[in-house]
Amino acid sequence: MRVTVTVNGTGYTREVEPRLLLIHFLRDELGLTGSHWGCDTSNCGACVVWLDETPVKSCTVLAPMADGRHVRTVEGLSRGAVLDPVQQGFAACHGLQCGFCTPGMMLTARWLLDRNPDPSEAEVREAISGQICRCTGYENIVRSVLWAARHESAGGYEAPDRGDGADARP
Amino acid sequence: MHDRDTGGNGAYGSIPRKEDARFVRGQGTFVDDITLPGMLHGAILRSPVAHARILSVDASAALAHPRVEAVLTGADLAERGLAWMPTLSADVQAVLATDKVRFQGQEIAFVVAQDRYAARDALELIAVDYEMLPPVIDARKALDPDAPVVRDDLVRDDVVRDDVPARARNHIFDWSAGDKAAADAVFAAAAVTVSCDMVYPRSHPAPLETCGIVADHNAVTGQLTLWSTSQAPHAHRTLYAMVTGLPEHKIRIVSPDLGGGFGNKVPLYPGYLCAVAASMVTGRPVKWVEDRSENLMSTTFARDYHMHGEIAATADGRILALRARVLADHGAFNATAQPAKFPAGFFHIFTGSYDLEAAFCEVTGVYTNKAPGGVSYSCSFRITEAVYLVERLTDMLARELGIDPAELRMRNLLRPEQFPYTCPTGWQYDSGDYPRALKLALDIAGYDDLRREQAERRARGEYMGIGISFFTEGVGAGPRSHMDILGLGMADGADLRVHPTGKAVLAISVQTQGQGHETTFAQIVAHELGLTPDDVEVVHGDTDRTPFGLGTYGSRSTPVSGAAAVMAARKVRDRARLVAAAMLELSADDLEWLDGKWRVRGDPDQAAGIAEIAMAAHSSLELPEGVEGHLDASAVYNPPNLTFPFGAYICVTDVDPATGEVKVRRFIAVDDCGVRINPMIVEGQVHRGLADGIGMALMQAIAFDEAGNCLGGSFMDYLLPTAMECPSPELGTTVTPSPHHPIGAKGVGESATVGSPAAVVNSVVDALAPLGVVHADMPLTPANVWLAIQGRPVRADLAVS
């Protein structure tokens, strides 16, 4: 069947099997490999993307369910060359090691900060509680999100002092 | 301090990681991200049962599927001599089953199709006839005279193995260390002894990225290129050459970005070889990526040690001796990954951190109808099990004697002046200041206040626990004289090229799975050569571009490969001195290395840095006799000993006796891993290991039912800690350099995984002490805690109690 999905602002139309998972649509059909597949059972969240304005686990969404809708992936987080504060925060606070869970974690963090610009540590932990990281023990992910909250201004992105947010550690 | 010790220029420190630039943009390249023209997709048909004879495999319907290109069965592989492969423990493992299936999830057939969905569909079309056999599930019954035989292949006439003893065919090995007579004598005379049976249950490393491969065989050139999830690409290349018969120089392994490993990506797996065979058969590239259940049910597990431990002491609390008897469940094939001379890994470092008179341990390995493996999950070759045993026993002894567990440990810890210390089972600990680390942990925790709080809570009927663990690790395998895997000595190489403009490329044999080698190894070279880390590019994970070495596991990257990088850099520096002398028209003896440059003694402003020297080394400058030009250098590092990091951990828990729920309130961790190249990365490694400890102690277990069904085959069943269960760790640092490592560093990647489970369990048992609980096996799930409170502890490794 034919589906048309807008991904990171660009429309894509593809002929797909109705059973095709959104994660495989993104990775195999569109070549957007930043989103990862990790578990099949929607426990790990490596596949989290936004469907319209909501983070979803794209291993449990069929591609046809995204027909006519907007998807945002890690490839759509930065604004041109300027990284999202969340991306800067993960680099500044060592919020990743292997990098496999990172795209999903960052998309959830972006969603959280859009709704709650000044979250508590407990609110950050709850927001990412549906996702698994095997490398960080979560501590530096929490610090990364709090760093991003501190560094983004109300109207947009604050440019990093240098490099990829390499300016500071909490 | 580091600069004085190492002559370096100060490139160490908590700098951000180079690799993050691609990862935060979603531009990492993992195996499943690789797509080649004409690539096909493989899927594996797996056994639904634990033990059965295969009567027939009929793949005709699958082959008729319009999108299927090939199906491989055990018989097909047998024709090519590929039905069995060697394991890392000199056993053999079935690639695709030809005779029997020996565990649930074992590989039976491999479908190759045009896309991954069609490959999965076709699995349903393969018909297999099984003759069911009774399984061996409980390791403690594996040696019974009437136990079913798991490995009848080993006693067939044509493959008789001399080392299969007659007493039971499920027996793999008996192994011991220490002085039995001496230990027995101490125990016989000791005033106090305490003993306990404890299970370290089977768990699984479960990296977030599962295992996978893209295999591309070119029949014309004979070239085999593999993009593979491999922590040890060079060792894998040699293994592929041995298994397939392809010449090793025609094999290239690329291990790209790895989504975690933790030991899970050390072995060769049947799926890899199936993809290789399928590429040979179809003439096209073949990708195979396992799903999560396949990962949990078939790839290497960890632990599964059934231990009986004893500790002997004087009445006033001086620990005298330890004994341990262990039954090791290795599953259906002996595929543990550790140095060949140590079938129980480094378990015999169970002497721990205390000054003992004697110690003795014996380990028996058995086959069962479960997935193969045993040494993985950041275990430092079984030191995890060893630390757990000694630290649980130490806590039990403290309770028996009525001595505070911190005080008992402080009395018995090795003293700084005892190093280097040779323990009763022969390990020589290189350096340590143990009391300093424990004292720091107690200070951070506010230990005395915690004990007061605990007393107050107990008076109110609340159950708060304080658990301590002190561990000694042994990492950086290892000396070639007694450590090898399948005959490959455990040395690692480093190649360092310095370009004319002074920029450098370091090629290393180890492979990061998230440890940040591209940053830390650049720091190592920059520190030695007066460069910045940005001046040094680190190449790794590609056997065509890197020197031979055994890879990353057992926390060996910094101790072994890091040392090789240092030695290569120092060769560069030494040659640069000769070139600098020619540049400055002086004798090399007139130069000293200071602040990152070769400087004239007494006139330090007259100097040459590596960039100038490199250009000169490539120029027409006349060089002294014996200097060939250029600065490039190689090194192979054969470590003289392991490095022995150590640490003191304190875990504070609150336990609800009505529900059995455990909450980890605080985790204090003091780690000493010698000189720290990048403290930020070290702390990140510790954070991970503490989460592992919480996971293993409280929720993670791969259990089986009586029929051999795996009960941990998905993330719905195999529970991993989330951000809700992991507290913010409180870390402390002491630095006791390794005396034999060239920059005084020790490994740290596994320290917290090794040390933390005992702290969690000690804490929970401490909380439950008023209820009479003296021990409960991991995982301390609410149900298991509740049953322990009721006085009915369960076998956590089995679904039957």
Image (cartoon, rainbow, N blue to C red):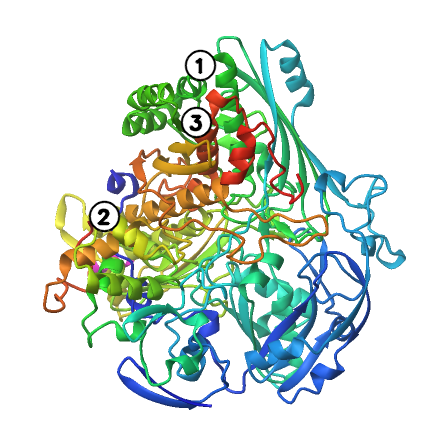
Say which quadrant the N terminus of chain B sits in.
Answer: top left
In terms of depth relative to the viewer, which is nearer, B417 or A51? A51
- Cα separation, mark 1 vs mark 2, equals 46 Å
In terms of depth relative to the viewer, which is nearer, B15 or B481? B15
Q: Which mark is residue B10?
A: 2
Residue type at mark 2: give it: Gly
In terms of depth relative to the viewer, which is nearer, B1 or A157? A157
Q: Nearer the viewer, mark 1 or mark 3?
A: 3
Q: Which residue is mark 3?
A: B767
Query: Which tag, 3 or 2, sits closer to the chain's start?
Result: 2
> Where is residue A159 drawn, in percent x and y?
13, 66
Magenta highlight on residue B207: no
Residues marked 3 and 2 touching at CB (< 8 Å): no
- Cα separation, mark 3 vs mark 2, equals 46 Å
Residue in view at x 41 percent, y 31 percent:
B431
Residue type at mark 3: give it: Ala
**Residue B671 vertical placement versus B766 (above, below):** below
Left or right of B96, for residue B549: left
Bounds of the magenta segment: B579-583
Q: Nearer the viewer, mark 1 or mark 2?
A: 1
